[in-house]
Image (cartoon, rainbow, N blue to C red):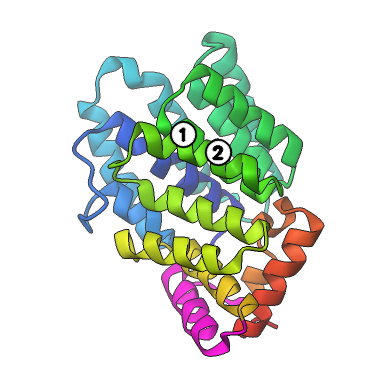
Amino acid sequence: ALSLQDEAARRIVAATLQVLFTCISTDDPESPLFLFNQGTQESNAKALTLLRKEVKRAPAESGPLIAISLALDDALREGWVDSPSETVAEMLRRASECLRLRPLYWVCHQVAGTAFLVTGQREKMVNAFEQMVAGNGLPVAYWYLGDALALAGRPEEAIDSLKEAMRWAPDDRQIFLWLLAKAKAHFAAERYADARDSALRSIELFPHYWWTHQVLAASYGQLGLSDEARVALNESLRLKSTTLEQVSTSPYLSTMDTGHRGRYVAGLSIAGME
């Protein structure tokens, strides 16, 4: 089973690899980004091996970001499977140290925001990603903020942030993640048909990310399309190599506000989740 830190590490490293290495493609099944976005233990391990090779060729100015990525790699290899709080505490400690050395460095806020995300601290999560936007301004920062706002139950603000991301980089190779965040925002606003359509567009661009299929399943469920919902949920479970029980106890569910979480779980229940 995937542990909490596996999810956090995949999210952080996958979203920043493209900033570090221009050679990465989401279409190449042997690229680190492709492997991280699959999110399985096997694909994470393979991606981290490839990442270490890329680190040796990376420019010196990428050092702080690489150090954080490799620190998360070390956390994975230490096997803190039974101590997720230790992993989150380590992420926050490294983010604080990063901010002390480089107060405006956006990735420090990114790491802190992700730690808050997986522990359900919505206000701190949004604040960290707002700081990330202030210190970065790159499209990826607007995506992180939009994704956080969607989970926090602020869908219209989320969509505004995602529009900024797409305005600045309409052809970005990670736009499938932005479309996923848009699907989450529409779901939070109870626009389930729009959530479905955004998820399907994301899957067209990158069909290998489990979370997109899960959001699609919940959207289909809320639309009363049980057969389609079941197919989408099964694909999500296949890609993530996980179980229905692990879905129901996911830390990301705790990040959603109560109403949003209830509707999401209800949609997944129609898809077959008990």
The CA span between labels 2 and 1 is: 7 Å
> How would you classify the magenta stretch by its main secondary structure?
helix
Residue 115 picture quarter: top right
Q: State the SS at label 2.
A: helix
> Is residue 51 something one can see in this rendering?
yes
Q: What's under tag 1, amino acid-wise? A: Glu
**Residue contact at pointers 2 and 1, CB within 8 angstroms:** yes
Q: Is residue 94 left or right of residue 138?
A: right
Q: State the SS at label 1.
A: helix
What span is colored magenta in the figure? 224-244
Where is 1 relative to 274, above or below? Answer: above
Q: Quadrant of the C terminus?
A: bottom right
Q: Which residue is mark 1?
A: 164
Q: What's under tag 2, amino acid-wise? A: Asp
Disc 2 packing (10 Å; few <14; some 14–19; many ≥20): few
Please state the horizontal and vertical placement of residue 162, each as a whole percent of the image: 49, 41
Q: Which residue is mark 2?
A: 160
Residue 258 picture quarter: bottom right
Disc 1 packing (10 Å; few <14; some 14–19; many ≥20): some
- Residue at the (29%, 48%) spot, across then down: 32
Q: Is residue 242 magenta?
A: yes
Please state the horizontal and vertical placement of residue 190, each as a whole percent of the image: 67, 63
Q: Which residue is nearer to you in this view: 185 or 265?
A: 185
Q: Is residue 271 magenta?
A: no
Residue 146 picture quarter: top right
- Residue at the (18%, 38%) spot, across then down: 23
Q: Which residue is nearer to you in this view: 271 or 3?
A: 271
